C-alpha cells in the first residue's frame, strides 16, 4: 500500500459514520446494503394473538408473554432481532 501524501483528502479521510434513523446503529455509505438494517416494520403491541382489534393489558395471572409481540412477525421478545432487512436510513434521506 502506497502512502498518498498529496492526494485528495476526502479519499483517505475516515468514512463518515451515519446514525440509522430506524435501528439507531451507525453505518457508512459504503457498508450500507439491502440487508444491513434489521428491523420490525410494525410495533411491539400488547394484546391477545387471536384478537386483531382489542389491545390488552397483561394481568398478574397471565404468563409472561401471553399478549406481547411484534405485530409484524409475532416475535414475543422486545429485543428480538428484526424480521425484515433493508438499507439503513439516515436522517438526511427523507424519502
Ligand atoms: Zn417483526
Ligand atoms: Zn438501520
Image: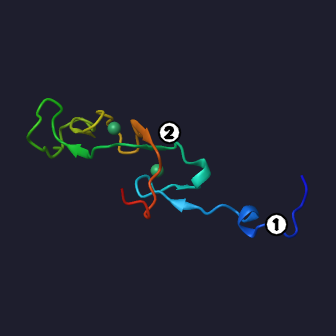
Q: Position of residue 24 (x, y in %)?
A: 46, 57
Q: Which residue is mark 1?
A: 7
Q: Position of residue 2 (x, y in %)?
A: 91, 56
Determine crowd level at label 1: few under 14, some 14-19, many 20+ residues with C-alpha closer than 10 A: few
Q: Extreme top residue here?
A: 50
Q: Is residue 33 left or right of residue 22?
A: right
Asked where in the image residue 52 lies, by quadrant, the reply is top left
Q: Position of residue 44 (x, y in %)?
A: 27, 45
Tag count in the figure? 2
Front one among 92 and 37? 92
Asked where in the image residue 59 lies, by quadrant, the reply is top left
Image depth: mark 2 or mark 1 in front: 1
Q: Is residue 52 left or right of residue 74?
A: left
Q: Which residue is mark 2?
A: 35
Residue at disc 2, secondary structure? loop
Residue located at (61% from left, 51% from top): 30
Front one among 2 and 16? 2
Q: Is residue 6 left or right of residue 26?
A: right
Residue at disc 1, secondary structure? loop
> Is 62 placed above or below 30 here?
above
Residue located at (47% from left, 56% from top): 20
Task: Tell me if residue 41 can be seen.
Answer: yes
Q: Position of residue 16 (x, y in %)?
A: 61, 63
Residue located at (59% from left, 61% from top): 17
Task: Tell me if residue 81 can be seen.
Answer: no
Amino acid at each position: 500500500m502506497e502512502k498518498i501524501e498529496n492526494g485528495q483528502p476526502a479519499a483517505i479521510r475516515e468514512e463518515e459514520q451515519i446514525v440509522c434513523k430506524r435501528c439507531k446503529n451507525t453505518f457508512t455509505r459504503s457498508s450500507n446494503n439491502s440487508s444491513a438494517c434489521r428491523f420490525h416494520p410494525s410495533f411491539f403491541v400488547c394484546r391477545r394473538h387471536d384478537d386483531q382489534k382489542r389491545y390488552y393489558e397483561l394481568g398478574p395471572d397471565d404468563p409472561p408473554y401471553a399478549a406481547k409481540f411484534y405485530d409484524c412477525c409475532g416475535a414475543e421478545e422486545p429485543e428480538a432481532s428484526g424480521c425484515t432487512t433493508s438499507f439503513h436510513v439516515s436522517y438526511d434521506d427523507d424519502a
